[in-house]
Structure formats: C-alpha cells, structure tokens
C-alpha cells in the first residue's frame, strides 16, 4: 500500500491540531476563553460563531447548517447529516462528537480541495462523476489502491452508477481518516499493522 502525502489536493493538514477537544466558554469579546481571538472579518469565524454552542464547538447538525449557510457546496446539494457526522469524526480525536474552530478551518481547507478535485473530473458539470472518474480522482489524491478496492468504494458511494458530490466527500473523509489511523500504527511504514478487536471496531465504527 502506498500512503498519500499530506500535500496535494487536501493540503498540509495535521489531524492532531492543538485545540482538538478543548472546552471553551464565551468571553466578553465575542470569542471563547482558552481560544485565540480571530478577526471578526474572517468569514469562517462568522459562520462558526453563528451556530456554535456555549462550549465553542459545533455538532453535526450545526455543521450542516453552517456549511449550508457558507455555501461551500456551491451548486451541489447541501451535505447530508451523515456526511457531516463523518466529517466531524475525521478530526474528533477525543470522540466528543463536536468540532472546534481550528478543526473547522482545517475541514474547510479539505472541503475546498476536494471540491476542486471533484470539479476537475466532473468535466460535463453534471454534479456527479462516473466510476472511472472517481477512480481517477482517488488516484490523483495519491492513494494507490488495487482495482478490487476501488470497485468496492465506487459501489459503496454511488447511486445508479454515479457518485454525487455529497457521497464523494464522504468517501474522501473516510479514506483520509482511516489512512491516518493506519499510518499512526504503522511505525515502520510497511503497510502492515496489528489491531486488537475493540480497537479495530473503535476506529471503523467511529467513522
């Protein structure tokens, strides 16, 4: 197995950024205690704080509303609640089911990159990609998967033989998250790791 680098279409991202899982309370300046103050002109900060709870984090339903308001899906259908859940799980290292602002910014960068990649293979602008285009997109992200694995991914995320943007993002999220989990355990970078049964379930079921 060949691991994709952190560069390329989803940018240089660290899944263990400093503020993951940090609990914060609102302060008098419109931010949250324990969190750096961000410019009020930052559109992402505005989108985030408009839906964030008192703890300064957002859950799947709030993320869905936030991304819809931000219009990141463009002309594509808004992200489903299930896709929002897996997006949070990708960065939710403490398994709270919520996302802070730094995780949100990281996700935003990933979504923009995945959208660009999707548009690059959706040449007819139909809002969906064909199986061979999906294969091309996955390969362009640096994943080196065998044909059988690629076929399983296409079948899992396709509707009537086509993959729409929402499902495409869900596939990208799981690929990245599971690859990160695997790589962290593969100290020798040999493509082989050992999982205890409970650990395996935790890694896969949380996504």
Image (cartoon, grey):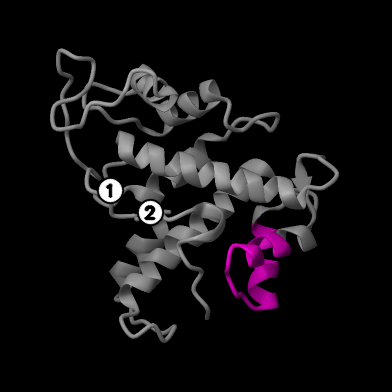
Between 93 and 72, the one lying in front of the other is 72
- Residue 85 drawn above or below residue 196: above
Query: Does the stretch in magenta take in 150?
Result: yes
Between 58 and 117, the one lying in front of the other is 117
Residue at 61% in and 75% down: 145
Residue 105 appears in view: yes
Between 141 and 184, the one lying in front of the other is 141
Residue at 44% in and 83% down: 191
**In terms of secondary structure, what is the magenta stretch mainly?**
helix
Residue 99 appears in view: no
Between 141 and 169, the one lying in front of the other is 141
Pointers 1 and 2 in contact (C-beta within 8 Å): yes
Residue at 37% in and 66% down: 181
Residue designated by label 1: 95
Seen as rendered, the residue at the extreme right is 124
Residue designated by label 2: 206
- Assign the C terminus to one quadrant of the image: bottom left
Query: Does the stretch in magenta take in 17?
Result: no
């Amino acid at each position: 197995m060949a691991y994709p680098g952190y560069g390329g279409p989803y940018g240089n991202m660290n899944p263990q950024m400093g503020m993951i899982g940090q609990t914060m309370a609102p302060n008098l300046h419109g931010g949250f205690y324990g969190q750096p103050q961000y410019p009020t002109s930052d559109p992402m900060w505005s989108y985030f704080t408009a839906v964030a709870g008192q703890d300064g984090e957002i859950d799947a339903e709030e993320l869905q509303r936030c991304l819809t308001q931000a219009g990141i899906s463009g002309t594509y259908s808004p992200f489903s609640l299930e896709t929002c859940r897996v997006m949070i799980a990708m960065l939710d290292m403490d398994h709270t089911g919520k996302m802070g602002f730094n995780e949100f910014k990281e996700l935003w960068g990933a979504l923009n990159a995945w959208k660009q990649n999707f548009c690059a293979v959706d040449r007819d602008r139909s809002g969906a990609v064909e199986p061979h285009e999906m294969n091309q997109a996955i390969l362009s992200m640096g994943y080196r998967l065998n044909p059988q694995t690629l076929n399983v991914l296409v079948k899992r995320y396709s509707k009537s033989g086509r993959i729409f943007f929402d499902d495409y993002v869900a596939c990208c999220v799981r690929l990245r998250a599971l690859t990160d989990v695997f790589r962290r355990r593969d100290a020798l970078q040999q493509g082989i790791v050992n999982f205890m049964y409970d650990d395996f379930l935790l890694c896969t079921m949380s996504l």
